[in-house]
Amino acid sequence: MFLVAGLGNPGEEYALTPHNMGFLTVDRLAERHGIRVTRKDSKALTGVGDIGGEPVMLAQPQTFMNLSGVSLAPLMEKHAIGLDRLVVVYDDLDLGWLALRIKPKGSAAGHNGMKSIVACLGSSEFVRVRLGVHPGPPLSGGKEYLLAPLRRAQSKELDDFVGYAAGAVESIIAEGVVKAMTRFNRRAPGLNEEEA
């Protein structure tokens, strides 16, 4: 069984913030595949269903972003899910808005939710889908931006972006990481990103 974990913060005040792109992607996957992500399990909301002929558990850790690993590690142990079946979806301030990067493994690169997961799992050998949220102009405070509501222009593009991210996860499950990277990895339009 695959475990697709979308990272974010619980609570209405965080629902449509850049930091909740992982939650929003899991919501879209749940909607597309008729999976109810309502079961409480290992400090996460979870739901089990089928995506592309594969059994999949969708999860939204409810520990708040910086403690995401506290939920995912026991969830994986309880359901005997290996690192090779874990896909973590999260916002990335190192990538411009609308960029998407699938990586088969890698460092936490300063993302506190990923730091927690890597620390709790004792490994960084798992697939991640990084969703670019940097708005373009220099930010005076990254944390403030991540926890504030999406800007008006971003809100207009959110539906398509979340749909694209959900498609990337579906591709990973159905076709494997390499094909998914070829099909879905993209840079932010009009932004010269640093390779992160």
Image (tube, rainbow, N blue to C red):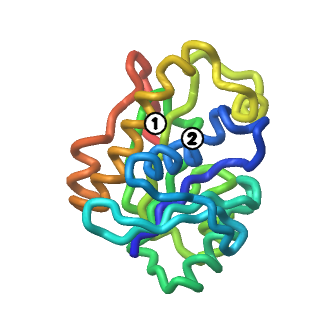
Q: Give percent across and percent down for residue 196.
A: 47, 42
Left or right placement of residue 101 versus residue 13 in this view:
left
Amino acid identity at mark 2: Met
N-terminal-most mark, 1 or 2? 2
Q: Can residue 115 be seen in this view?
A: no
Residue depicted at 63% across the width and 42% down the height: 20
Residue depicted at 59% across the width and 85% down the height: 78
For the N terminus, give its image quadrant: bottom left
Disc 2 secondary structure class? helix
Which residue has dot 1 on it? Answer: 162
Q: Is residue 21 above or below residue 129?
A: above
Tell me the number on the disc at residue 134: none
Amino acid identity at mark 1: Val
Q: Can residue 2 be seen in this view?
A: yes
Residue depicted at 63% across the width and 67% down the height: 39
Residue 136 falls in image quadrant: top right
Q: Give percent across and percent down for residue 154.
A: 55, 20
Disc 1 secondary structure class? helix
Q: In this view, does 58 lie above or below 22?
A: below
Tell me the number on the disc at residue 21: 2
| CB-based contact (under 8 Å), mark 1 and mark 2 | yes
Q: Is residue 136 above or below residue 184?
A: above
Q: Give percent across and percent down for residue 143.
A: 76, 35
Residue depicted at 61% across the width and 14% down the height: 152
Q: How would you rate the neighbour count of disc 1 (Cα within 10 Å): few for under 14, some for 14-19, many for 20 or more?
A: many
